[in-house]
Structure formats: structure tokens, C-alpha cells
Image (cartoon, rainbow, N blue to C red):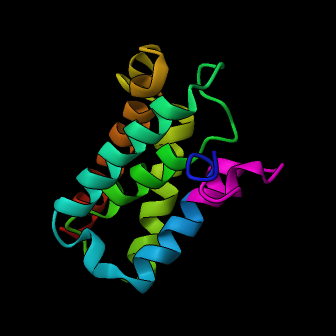
Amino acid sequence: MALATCFFVGRIPLLPGTCASFLTALVILLFPFLCARPFFPLLFALFSLFVLRRARPKEKDPREIVIDECAGMFMTMLWRSITPSSLLLGFLAFRAFDILKPFPIRRLERIGGALGILLDDVLAGIYANIVLFLLRR
């Protein structure tokens, strides 16, 4: 459960998903090479799926399980220039898409199980990545 909660960040009572996303942004700022190529974000997403399946959450998307938010942030910053401002914009865009869940993100969440928990955040990250790409132009 420590991995699923990102070493208990998910147990923070106020906004655990936002806290995990922010922590991931700090990790990316310290180690920008993690998002330079798709290998690490995709591997992290697969690892997250494995962790989520092992955690066997009883709820549809439990608040304390935040490893999916970390995967979403890695997807947000994939192939993007890592600067404090790009990370802030990416963080805000990712959280907006993750919270608002525009089409088809909400549908992915309805899949249920580990895959549904993960896919909605990965797609929110992809949407945020596109926003960063468009803002860069």
C-alpha cells in the first residue's frame, strides 16, 4: 500500500491527488531526464497498473491511492521542456483535466478496477501535454 499511496502522500487528508501531483512535479524538476523519452513515463504507467492491481481497491477510485496521479504528471511532462514555469502550467492543466474529466476521461474512469483508475489520469496527462505543446507554439 505504500507504493499505491506514494509513500503515504495519499493519506494526507486535504487534496491527496493534488499533493501527489505536486510531489511528482518536484521529482521531475530535480530529474528532468525522466520525461525526455517515453520509456520512463510508460514504464511508470505499467508499474502503476501492477501496483493498483495488487492493492485491489474496493472503491472505484479511492482518494488515498495516488500513484495514478503521479503517472498522469509524468505523461503531462513527456517530451516537454522542463522549467519551473512549464511544470507549473503542466501541473495546473493536469489537475484541471483530472478534476473536470472532459470527454472521454470520465468514460475511462467508469471502466473500473486498476485499469479505470489509471487510464483516466493518463489521458488527463495527455490532454495537459497537448495544452503545453499548443502554448509553446
Q: Is residue 19 magenta?
A: yes
The residue stretch that appears in magenta: 6-20
Residue 19 rendering spot, x and y as whole percentages: 66, 59
Residue 71 rendering spot, x and y as whole percentages: 40, 51
Residue 136 picture quarter: bottom left
Up the image or down, 3 lies above or below 52; here it is: below
Up the image or down, 102 lies above or below 10; here it is: above
For this orientation, the residue located farthest to the front is 54
Left or right of 102 in this view: 43: left
| Quarter of the figure with the N terminus | top right
Residue found at x 56% / y 25%: 56
| Quarter of the figure with the C terminus | bottom left
The answer to whether one can see residue 52 in this image is yes
Left or right of 131 in this view: 137: left
Residue found at x 28% / y 57%: 41
Residue 118 picture quarter: top left
Up the image or down, 20 lies above or below 25; here it is: above
